[in-house]
Amino acid sequence: MTKLACPRETYGKYLVQVAAKDERIVALDADLSGSTMSCLLRQEFPQRHFEMGIAEQNMVAVAAGLAFSGKIPFVHSFSIFLTGRAFEQVRQSVALANANVKLVGSSYGFSDFGDGATHQALEDVAVMRVLPNLTVLVPMDAKEVEEAVDLALKIDGPVYIRISRSPMEFLRKEQPGSSLLEPSLMAEGQDLVVFANGLMTKTALEAREILAQEGISIRVVNVSCVKPLAEESIRRLAADVQGVITVEEHSVIGGLGSAVLEALALTPKPTCLIGVQDTFGQSAQSHEELLEHYGLTKEAICERARFLMGRGQK
Amino acid sequence: MEKRDLAYLKSKARKVREGIVRAIGVGQKGHLGGSMSSADLVTALYFYKMRHWPDNPSHPDRDRLIFSKGHSVLAQYAALAECGYFPVEALSTTKQLGSFLQGHPERDRTPGIEANTGSLGQGLSIGLGMALAGRLDNRDYKVYVILGDAELAEGQIWEAATAAAFYKTDNLVAIVDHNKMQATGKIPELYDVGAVALKFASFGWRVLEVDGHDLAAVVEALDEADVSTGQPVAIIAHTVKGKGVSFAEHVASFHNGALTAEQYEQALREIAQDEV
């Protein structure tokens, strides 16, 4: 039986654990601490959790001031408000100054399915990735959420961590010395390579099973660190296959797919980008319903794979 | 304050103004107006009020000064140079390619600069973060943030004002350089936020009003803010844009204007003769 974990709960608990060991860690939230789970830190260390009200711009710049004074602030909101509403504060007060601020965006993609387009961040990776100094992490499971926090603490500078609201299966293998900075080979294959992250890595592994029965062998690579992208590794993993597929719960503009294409620009391969096709989301009854509606499915991956192998239409 | 100390501060204010002019130089645009209106405030902070160590700019107990109106950082550069953070001669490299003195403040490049500002409206929030950190660490430093009056149109200022009052950060002092001008002209004619003192008071701040060019009065207000407890303090400093250079006073084009060689010399001459 597969083991599921809710990444935001794992995150909230783990933040308390690391904060217990490092007094410099503080947290800020904009009235969403019950969703981002920074509320757990507030229960444990009330003096080190700042409720900043529904004022994300101020919150992000306050975090910069805390960082300039030796603190390690973890700043919380939904992905869209943190990276969208406060984009300029992230750029000017945080990224430009290389402030040691950790931005934790919750409920990205379609994981806040019911709330609709205003709450569904499909462009956060793009707008964070374009900023110098920022590291952008998209964990594929709860274990990687913990590793993302560990990595963020090792980096003396700004980090954006994207955390889903939906439960995720544990996929991360214990590999001593492995780092989220490096793409991880999830399953080997000879014909095509699929680069995925977040919830989509699991979907890619499911597609691989279906394609194997049709005689198409795909390599699945999880890319949790979209920036800085390990470009050499991306090129190496794409060197001996006929085509490339990228899958992400994000717009096809500016996210993982764009980053992979940039890495492969000098050694191009036929590439298909699976993601949200330059459109906003909408409300639905479940996360799965939206993933299905916007084509973020194992079937979509299979269809693209067949096309790249010359077996499908289009 | 003793007459002797006041004379000392006045001499430092002249040095700051001279430094601003040298940083702008001849033939290149520079933010003269707002730097000059802040010059006496900066002088009172660096040469009277603030506890700071020019040979150790990152001393954890230093008082902090953030120019939220980052375009007026020339006044801060001039004061930092006069204090010995870097040579006064470096001022003339301001805005040159590769210079550690950028058009707007950058903390990683310039000793004594605390934050990257210039995108208006963000400095008070950064100062609040420093004030909260000081409280967590039981350090008694003060954080001073100089705001422009036109900058008060930025909504984030009022987010920060709300949060500072809620958290009762009495180690945070906002100083409004109230020169009644914005980049494009006179505030009352163009866009007036209005009732500045009343606004801060209603947000929960203690408010002091002062003539921003009366050094004795500025010193008195800073001392008063220092001992005030239980709430943040806003000092509304009434100033004149371009103060100290006759042809630039109240003139919008010198918000960011270039000096001719004649104007450059005239400005230095007037500053040297000025009794403030």
Image: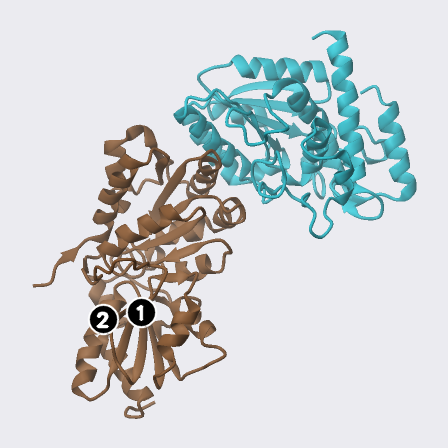
Chain colours: A brown, B cyan
Report crowding for label 2: few under 14, some 14 to 19, many 20 or more residues within 10 A (C-alpha).
some
Give residue B183's position: percent from left, percent from top.
Answer: 70, 42
x 85%, y 31%: residue: B246
Q: Quadrant of the C terminus of chain B?
A: top right
- Out of B93 and B272, give the one closest to the viewer: B93
Residue placed furthest toward the front: A176
- Out of A112 and A203, give the one closest to the viewer: A203
The CA distance from mark 1 to mark 2 is: 9 Å
Q: Are marks 1 and 2 on the same chain?
A: yes
- Figure check: A296 above or below A312: above
Residue placed furthest toward the left: A1
Please indicate, yes or no, whether residue A84 appears anywhere in the rendered image.
Answer: yes
- Chain bearing tag 1 is A
- Figure check: A257 above or below B182: below
Which residue does the numbered mark 2 point to in the structure image?
A203
x 50%, y 79%: residue: A266
Q: Quadrant of the N terminus of chain B?
A: top right
- Chain bearing tag 2 is A
Q: Is residue B29 left or right of residue A150?
A: right
Mark 1: amino acid: Ala
If you read the primary sequence from the N terminus, does the residue marked by circle 1 or circle 2 appear first? 1
Mark 2: amino acid: Thr
Q: Which mark is residue B26?
A: none
- Figure check: B222 above or below B77: above
Q: Element at badge 2?
A: helix
Give residue B199's position: percent from left, percent from top.
Answer: 53, 27
Please indicate, yes or no, whether residue A106 appears anywhere in the rendered image.
Answer: no
Q: Are marks 1 and 2 in contact (CB under 8 Å)?
A: yes
Which residue does the numbered mark 1 point to in the structure image?
A196
Total residue callouts: 2
